Image (cartoon, grey):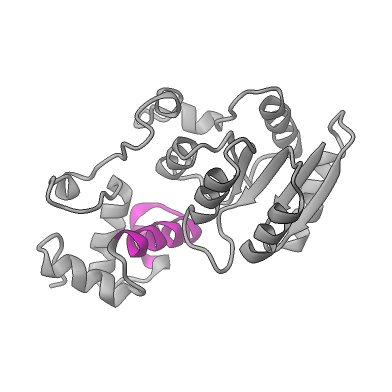
Amino acid sequence: MKVLLIDDHALFRDGILLVLKGMNEALETFEAGSFNAAKQLLAEQHKLDLVLLDLGLPGVTYLDALIYIRQQFPDLPVVVLSGTEEHSIVEHALRLGAKGYIPKSSSAKIMLSALQLVIAGGIYVPPEIMKCEATNIPQATMRDAQSPVLHESFADNNVPYKLTQRQGDVLREMAKGKSNKAIGMELHLTESTVRVHVSAIFKSFGVANRTQAVRYAVQRGWVNND
């Protein structure tokens, strides 16, 4: 069995490799510390069985790495490994075709069980996400794959993109001039989760920075920066 591990932190990759040794499989592992390195390995290794993917890779925003792999290699199972546990991001990743979402805070035992479930053909969803009243992940992964959770202010049919409710909240805090850290404290999110949402907003608006994003939203009356 061939496994590609994509994560920019060498120590975390080492830890995952130790977890993989606990599987009852003859494994051949490959490592990539960047998206470009991952694309090269994906092109070279034509018989990979599983990809373990970090969301916070340098040089790529939000879920673009997952989207790329799913488009180019639709039969290759991908499991997301992430420090972000925001339920809307988990749901989005699963809707895009990830076969599992494992928080990096998980124990080695949980990671091993999750990977074994995926290899057996299942889909792993973190228990704390399953318990969240606001999520509907099992159904969402089976249907409505392109239907995001809309914030009421961004649900107008004339708007050429859709934001999740949490992304709308982050955008409003950005308009107040708050840093990622301050936004995280206000919305009870980790700073890494805020960065993921900010990157998603940039991509949705087609902008390169916070100033452009806020200006774009203000000009359309979606937020104000008073």
Q: Residue at x 42, y 53 (%)?
A: 189
| Residue 21, horizontal then vertical, whole percent | 87, 39
* Stretch of the chain drawn in magenta: 182-204
Query: With 107 as the anchor, is 87 left or right in this view?
Result: left
| Residue 18, horizontal then vertical, whole percent | 84, 45
| Residue 22, horizontal then vertical, whole percent | 86, 35
Q: Residue at x 40, y 42 (%)?
A: 88
Asked where in the image residue 113 lies, by quadrant, the reply is top right
Q: Please determine whether, in this image, residue 68 is positioned above or below residue 121.
A: below
Q: Nearer the viewer, residue 74 or 19?
A: 74
Query: With 137 as the anchor, is 6 left or right in this view?
Result: right
Q: Nearer the viewer, residue 148 or 160?
A: 160
Query: With 124 as the anchor, is 214 left or right in this view?
Result: left
Q: Residue at x 59, y 35 (%)?
A: 100
Asked where in the image residue 102 lies, by quadrant, the reply is top right
Residue 184 part of the magenta segment:
yes
Q: Residue at x 13, y 45 (%)?
A: 157
Query: With 2 as the anchor, is 196 left or right in this view?
Result: left
What is the number of callouts on the image?
0
| Residue 128, horizontal then vertical, whole percent | 51, 32
Q: Main secondary structure of the magenta part?
A: helix
Q: Nearer the viewer, residue 40 or 156?
A: 40
Q: Which quadrant does the N terminus fall into? A: top right
Q: Please determine whether, in this image, residue 6 is positioned above or below residue 150.
A: below
